[in-house]
Amino acid sequence: MAKHILRELLESDIPAVAELERLCNPMPWNAIDLTRFASHSGDSHDSGSQPVGRVAVLADTHEVIGYVCANLVGSEAEILVLGVAPEHRRQGVGESLLIDLRTVLEPLGCYVLFLEVRESNTPAIALYSNVGFEEIGLRKGYYADTGEGAKMMKWNG
C-alpha cells in the first residue's frame, strides 16, 4: 500500500483535484473555482468576520486521491466540498481528511463544523456520522440540479 501524505493544496494539484471533483460531485467546482478558493488557504485567522479558506489534499506517492475544502469564519467552519477518488473509497481516505481538517481548525479556535449532504448520498452520510457529525436538519430542494434536499450535519469538538 502506498504511503499517504496529508498536506495543503499545491498549485500543481489543481488539475488533479478538479478532475476528482468532476468525478465526485454532480455540480463540480472547476480549476478556476479551486484556484480562487485556494488563494485564501494560507490567510491568517483573526476574530472572524472574513472567511478563511482551508484546503487539504491526501496524496499517495504518485497522485492526489482525496481533498476537502472548508471555510472558517470565527469559531465555526463549513465543509464546502470533499471528494475521494473512486478506487480509494472505503479505505479511510475521507475519514483521514475530516480528522485532519478538525486537527488544523481546533488550534484556530474552531470547534464546530457544518456541512450539507444530498439526502441520497448514504455513503457520505455514514462517513460523516462515523466521525462524529450529527444530523441537525433538512434543506428541502437544496440542490438546483435535481431539487433534492440536503441533510444538514454538525460536528461539535
Image (cartoon, grey):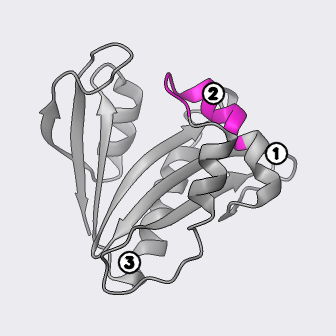
Residue 109 lies, in percent from the top left, at 32, 82
Amino acid residing under circle 1 = Glu
The residue lying at 76 percent from left, 41 percent from top is: 16
The relative height of residue 10 versus residue 141 in the rendered view (above or below) is below
What span is in magenta? 17-28
In space, the residues marked 3 and 1 are separated at their CA atoms by 28 Å
Left/right placement of residue 25 relative to residue 31 reads left
Residue 22 is tagged as 2
Q: Earlier in the sequence, mark 2 or mark 1?
A: 2
Left/right placement of residue 50 relative to residue 85 reads left
Residue 106 is tagged as 3
Residue 63 is tagged as 1
Around disc 2, counting alpha carbons within 10 Å, would you say few (fewer than 14), some (14 to 19), or many (20 or more)?
A: some
Amino acid residing under circle 2 = Arg
- Find residue 105 and report its image quarter: bottom left
Residue 88 is tagged as none
**What secondary structure is found at the residue carrying circle 1?**
loop
**What secondary structure is found at the residue carrying circle 3?**
helix
Give the quadrant of the C terminus. bottom left
Give the quadrant of the N terminus. top right
Amino acid residing under circle 3 = Glu
Residue 103 lies, in percent from the top left, at 46, 72
Q: Earlier in the sequence, mark 2 or mark 3?
A: 2
Q: Is residue 54 visible?
A: yes
User: 17 or 136, which is in the foreground?
Assistant: 17
Around disc 3, counting alpha carbons within 10 Å, would you say few (fewer than 14), some (14 to 19), or many (20 or more)?
A: some
